[in-house]
Image (cartoon, coloured by chain):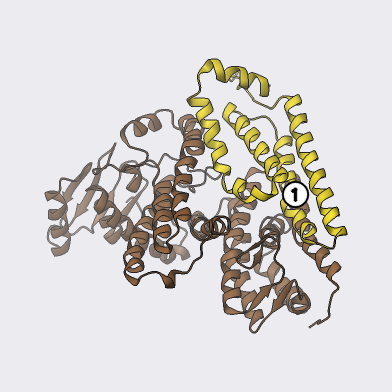
Amino acid sequence: MGALKSMFRLRRSIKLALALAIASGVGVRLATMVTALAEGDPDHLLAFPLAVIFPAFLAGLLLAMPATRSREGALMRLGTIIQLALIILLPTVALYLALGLPVVFLVVELFETRLPRALREPVVRAVLA
Amino acid sequence: MIDIDLPHEWLWTLRWALFLGPLAAVLVLGARHRHEPRVIVGGLFAFLYGFAMIFATHQLAIAAGWWRYGGDVLMVMGLPADIWIGGAILFGPVLAFLFPTIRPLYLVLPIILGLHGMVFSSLDPLVMAGPFWFAGVVLVFLVAHLPAIHLARWTARGEHLAWRAALLALGYGFLAFYVLPSVIMLAMGGSWNIGAQPAWLILTGLPVLGTCFVIGLSAVQMFVVHGEGTPIPLDPTKRLVRSGVFAYLVNPMQLSSALSWIVIGVMIGNIWVASAAVMAWVFVAGMVRWHHRHDLLQRFPEGWPTYRANVPEWFPRWKPWVPQAARLVFDPGHTWQAAFAGWLQRRNPIGLTLEAQPGAALTYRDPSEARDFTAAAALGKALGHVNFACALLGAAVLLLTLPLRHLRQKAAPTPLGEPVA
């Protein structure tokens, strides 16, 4: 029998919190769009698919993906979802956040390879199942 | 040709549809192929290639006055980002997933003639057609859409490795050195106004940039020739690649990208574009090392640690690390072959045995390879055993000779290089 490989996934509570954050972001942006449209400004309406629906869609995909084979993979997924949520919630800096996406991977790498085990493990246990 | 004025509300709906339609389609079609990873990877490659090349060809179209887009929402150098991304999804993964067996040309012809030919001039103020717009549309399809669909199909079927790698390299080149700097300048300020820079700066910068590109392109070529795969881990090599530029450093593509961003930043006088080099380091530190640990170390548990212990990540060795000596067979009676062998001998090549065989063609043989390299390709390979500078010269020779040889061999389905006798 082959050796069983560990699989890593986000805790259900973390997934729920992320989904709520993203849904809230979408709600806020939707309200902003409607208000702007009522004032005769269609710019928010035109930007909505790419600036709101697309990152929400990507975050949804990441949340729905199966478990990863490595812990870093699951943490990188978590970091990317947080970044996408910020892109939705903070439209004025969304472009900078998108350009800075590789930093998420660096942070995860530093977290996994440089942070003392005593600090790292409780955080990992809190977010990964 | 239909030429009507559409109300603004319809055009807003159209703009939503041009982005959300392909997005929804790729989601549904991707789910249908979720158990076929090569199909999904092919779709992803098609999207990335299309993303880069649609931007490049549209910039040409806008500059030439073939058409221009109206509005000021989500614009990147005159191109609406949502239409751009929607187009890359539609004319890449969506068409590739939807029609996996129909020839790409037959797929796009009706779209060019039917859709674009009929309604393109009715989309004002979304897009305003200028003179020669139809030629521009044909160019976009030839350069961006057709190759994207081919790339998806070839990746899904595991065919045409050399062409796949060439398209990936082209797409990455435009993505990294044209799209990304353009987006950086959109965020941080600046423009591609090279004409305003001093001529000496451009004339000095171009050869340096060319050298940077040789490092990266040579790495891609080594992956194809020696690894039988592409540089993208999603379509990985079958063997660990330690030849050519990889005998000097582990991350030639990342070094190439970082140096190229610095050179481009200096040439256009933009510190932010040059700073993208930091992102290359961030990418290596965050993503590439992870890939090394979880992919290369797993697939090559013996070869990878030894290679990694001997070859640096960023700063190239001056002399190569060669685990198994190769042979260069030459004809001592042939003037230039003998001269080249003598020149090599005087430079003490690392891991290369010179073997005189009267009447032989110049032939490079690596014991771990299933093929030989002859004539100019052998010269290029042999130069890789001298030092880093010579290796770059050899890489440039190989970048010219191996594709030409591949094109010549296209009629006969043989791999790159010559089969071992």
Please tell me which residue lies in front, B298 or A40.
A40
Horizontal side of residue B337 vs B219, given as left or right:
left
- Tell whether B362 sits left or right of B226: left
Q: As rendered, which of B151 and A123 lies closer to the eye?
A: A123
Residue B11, given in percent of the width and then of the height, sits at 81, 68
Task: Say if residue B132 shows up in the picture.
Answer: yes
Res. B261 image quadrant: bottom left
* Chain for disc number 1: A
Which residue lies most toward the right here?
A38
- Outermost residue, front side: A39
The residue tagged with tag 1: helix, strand or loop? helix
Residue at screen point 45% across, 50% down: B275
Q: The chain drawn brown is chain what?
A: B
Please state the horizontal and vertical placement of residue B324, each as a whole percent of the image.
28, 38
Residue depicted at 34% across the width and 41% down the height: B368
Q: Nearer the viewer, residue B310 or B63?
A: B63
Q: Residue at x 26, y 54 (%)?
A: B363
Chain depicted in yellow: A
User: x, y (%) of residue B206?
Assistant: 36, 65
- Compared with residue B200, is residue B307 higher up or lower down, i.e. above or below? above
Residue density around tag 1, few if under 14, some if 14–19, many if 20 or more, within 10 Å: many
**Residue B77 falls left or right of residue B255:** right
Query: In the rendered view, would you say A107 is above or below B255?
Result: above
* Residue identifier under label 1: A52
Residue type at the position of mark 1: Val
**Residue A9 locus on image (x, y percent):** 68, 27
- Locate residue B399 relative to residue A63 in the image: left or right: left
Image label count:
1
Residue B35 in view, yes or no:
no
Q: Quadrant of the N terminus of chain B?
A: bottom right
